[in-house]
Image (cartoon, helix red, strand yellow):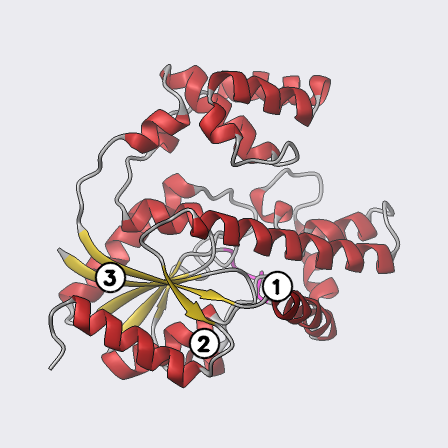
Amino acid sequence: MIPLLVITGPTASGKTALAIEIAKRIGGEVVSADSMQVYKEMNIGTAKPDEAEMAGIPHHLLDVVSPDENFSLAAFVPLAHKAIRDIHDRGKTPILAGGTGLYVDTVMENRPLSENSFDPAVRLRLEKEWEEKGGESMHKMLFDLDPEAAEKLHPAEKRRILRALEIYYTSGETKSAHLRKKPEKIYDYFVFALELPREILYNRINRRVDAMLSAGLLAEVEKIYNDLRGKKRTALQGVGYKELIWYLEGKASYDEAVELLKRNTRRLAKRQMTWFRANPSVIWLDGMQKVDKLADECIARFMRQKGEAK
């Protein structure tokens, strides 16, 4: 099996810096597991590392598609598997780093891709039902069919609720049943997650949003919004983009949009923590430590569990 080091955790916890520091020391390359960093031109709002931050470490699955193209788990997984294999075949250590929990888990556990179930007619029908009945009703529908999946979702998570319903109506099997199928293990993975006190994490998030705005986030969002005007694209649904689009459309004042952005980012971090806490394989790290100390700990554990400790 291919040794795979995984660095995850909530947004603004320091995943990128840690993955890069580890990669420098062990000859690694980073495979991004972030559902928004795959988009070209979306740099500020996704906290995509720039050349200076990468420090010469190769990064994979950044800038994969344009914002005009929809992207999904089904598109991500084969690209991630290929990148990991290529890195390993070149004698380097693959490091999967990112906070999109579904992407991380599906790749490292080699889960079957239920996303292959697709029927445009079913999707259109479910979209129409959502517009007519609303999120609460559709969430209840999912709860009746697949309570295990529904319990993990909020009624406002339209895309995930509709996708879970679509899997059921196209395959005849629930999303939870798909995920319970025992996959073939292809990675000897070691997964680390960063944890910080909630107040400190939320303060980091608020400061990072302010820094993004100062760096030109609104201009970035406005350009993408104008390029995609009238089109429904996954890229426009990302936290940091949809809130400022509300401002551009006159649905919220600038100050209201900024507060929504901060609030939604904090809620995203909370959902991420809930997701990763459900995984017993996760080794939790104190995110308050300096990055060099965290790298020491990750590498020591990684090597020890591989049986390579001297």
Residue shown at 51% from the left, 45% from the top: 69
Residue shown at 42% from the left, 24% from the top: 118
Residue shown at 16% from the left, 59% from the top: 2
Counting residues from the start of the chain, the first of labels 3 and 2 encountered is 3
- Residue occupied by mark 3: 4
Instruction: Answer left or right for 182 relative to 73.
Output: left
Closer mark to the observer between disc 1 and disc 3 = 1
Instruction: Answer left or right for 233 relative to 189.
Output: right
Q: Secondary structure at mark 3?
A: strand
Check residue 280 in the rendering and tell me which mark sits there, or answer none: none
Question: What amino acid type is highlighted by mark number 2?
Answer: Ala
Counting residues from the start of the chain, the first of labels 1 and 3 encountered is 3
Name the one closer to the observer, 19 or 241: 19
Taking the magenta stretch, the answer to whether it contains residue 282 is no
Question: What amino acid type is highlighted by mark number 3?
Answer: Leu
Q: Is residue 286 above or below residue 162?
A: below
> Label 3 crowding class (10 Å Cα cut-off): few <14, some 14-19, many 20+?
many
The answer for how far apart the CA atoms under marks 2 and 1 are is 20 Å
Name the one closer to the observer, 188 or 301: 301
Q: Secondary structure at mark 2?
A: helix
- Residue occupied by mark 2: 17
Q: Is residue 123 above or below residue 110?
A: above
Quarter holding the N terminus?
Answer: bottom left
Residue 92 appearing in the image: no
Q: Position of residue 110 (x, y in %)?
A: 26, 44
Q: Secondary structure at mark 1?
A: helix
Q: Position of residue 219 (x, y in %)?
A: 73, 64
Name the one closer to the observer, 61 or 10: 10
The answer for how far apart the CA atoms under marks 3 and 2 are is 18 Å
Name the one closer to the observer, 286 or 233: 286
